[in-house]
Amino acid sequence: MGCPRGGSGAVLGSSGSHWAVPGEALGWYWAILGGTGVSPQGAGAIVVSSGTVLGSSGRHRWALSYHWSVTVTPVWHWGRWAALWDAALSPLRCQATLRRPRMRNMAHARPDYTSRQALRGPSSRRAPRRGRSRCRRRGTGRGGDRGAMAEKGAASRPPPDVDADECLREYRHLFSPDILAGQVAFITGGGSGIGFRIAEIFMRHGCRTVIASRNLQRVSEASKKLVAATGQQCLPLSVDVRQPQTIAAAVDEALKEFKRIDILINGAAGNFLCPASALSFNAFKTVIDIDTIGTFNTSKVLFEKYFRDHGGVIVNITATLSYRGQALQVHAGSAKAAIDAMTRHLAVEWGPNKIRVNSLAPGPITGTEGYRRLGGRFAEESSLFDTIPLQRAGNKTEIAHSTLYLASCLSSYVTGTTLVVDGGSWLTSANNFPAMLGIASSSAKL
């Protein structure tokens, strides 16, 4: 009589030393244990199972081909049948091949379980190891980690700048060098401070500029520096933004020279520290005239003469003074708040003409007239900048880079908003009226 045979199938592999064996493959065990169908004269091999084990390790798939047979020796003892198993598994043959099978060859043998996770079940998902990423980024590892540590804080490190109204001695492009190639920017207040640096950075990115100010000598000298440093054209013009006729004349001259104007930077401003009780009517009106009305005048002239038919970009330089009612700044805070409102109105009305209008609100910026007049030196010496989240003042190049973003195609879907570039200053800096009076007194002596 032949030996009984158990089921034949695939043993499904799991992790470690655990195996899952189909129940039908164990049917032979119970039949032999009962002693049925076993001959006393012979011995035979019971084939347990044969097949292929599928598994994976990391990125490698593997296949384990196996064949396992057991020799059984039945004996006659005192008239009873008894199944006495030879404990030795003879012979035990396990043939394994480790390879990366082609998926088209393995598809027919792939059961419903396609991963170790499927075998463990949905409730046994392993949590990722703490402190180790599930996937390693390119360039990291031991050497990459050291590089990352060496660059710690690079994202908030200020770019090089100079305090005086001079061009940068060296410059590394963070944006594409030709991002403004072929364009023309009209910059009020472009002869000094933030306006001067904006003109320089724009020109270093392929833009030609018109810098306008009431002081023609100042903008003429600034123009020579800018041309020498960048090799781009720069047209200096005298403009009083409080008088629309002077703006119109300057725009006509710029269009005659360059045939186009793509960008308007409203940077003309005036400011000083003064409590509202001591502020004269004329002083308040003067700041409103230069900042608020000057911004509207210049924007409207450009709209009528060029932007309405050709589109364009307007960036208004404002401030965060009105966000919490900054002491000693009712005049400038009111003027800048009005400009922020104007920005939103014009963005809505002029958007269909393909005109984007945004504001940029700087914080304390070194190397500017405002820094000297508004107590920057005093704040620096008194370590007041330590209260700023980034624990420092900003510089003109940082403001110029932010303006470049708003003026370029990088912000093509940005309009009607204010970009605050102040290191978090307005969130944490002091707004104590008596303390600010002390700053005002120190500032007045400079």
Image (spheres, rainbow, N blue to C red):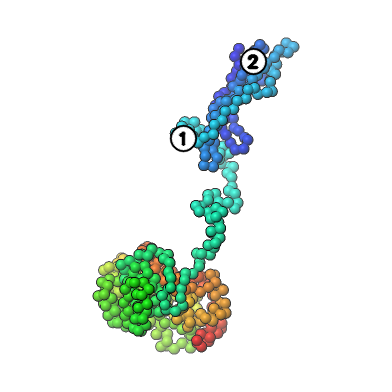
Q: Position of residue 223 (x, y in %)?
A: 35, 78
Q: Which residue is mark 1?
A: 102
| Mark 1 residue type | Arg
- Identify the residue at image location x=60%, y=25%: 93
Task: Give the SS element for disc 2.
Answer: loop
Q: Nearer the viewer, residue 91 or 50?
A: 91
| Mark 2 residue type | Ala
The answer for how far apart the CA atoms under marks 2 and 1 are is 41 Å
Q: Which residue is mark 2?
A: 43
| For residue 218, side relative to residue 114 (left or right) | left
Residue 435 lies, with reference to residue 85, above or below; the image says below
- Identify the residue at image location x=37%, y=65%: 177
Q: Position of residue 210 (x, y in %)?
A: 32, 75
- Identify the residue at image location x=54%, y=27%: 51
Specify whether residue 293 is in view: no
Q: Where is residue 7, by image quadrant?
A: top right
Q: Residues within 10 Å of mark 1 (few under 14, many from 20)?
A: few
Do labels 2 and 1 touch, CB within 8 Å?
A: no
Quarter of the image for the N terminus: give it.
Answer: top right
Q: Nearer the viewer, residue 221 or 30?
A: 221
Residue 34 lies, with reference to residue 312, above or below; the image says above
Specify whether residue 94 is in view: yes
| For residue 297, side relative to residue 68 (left or right) | left
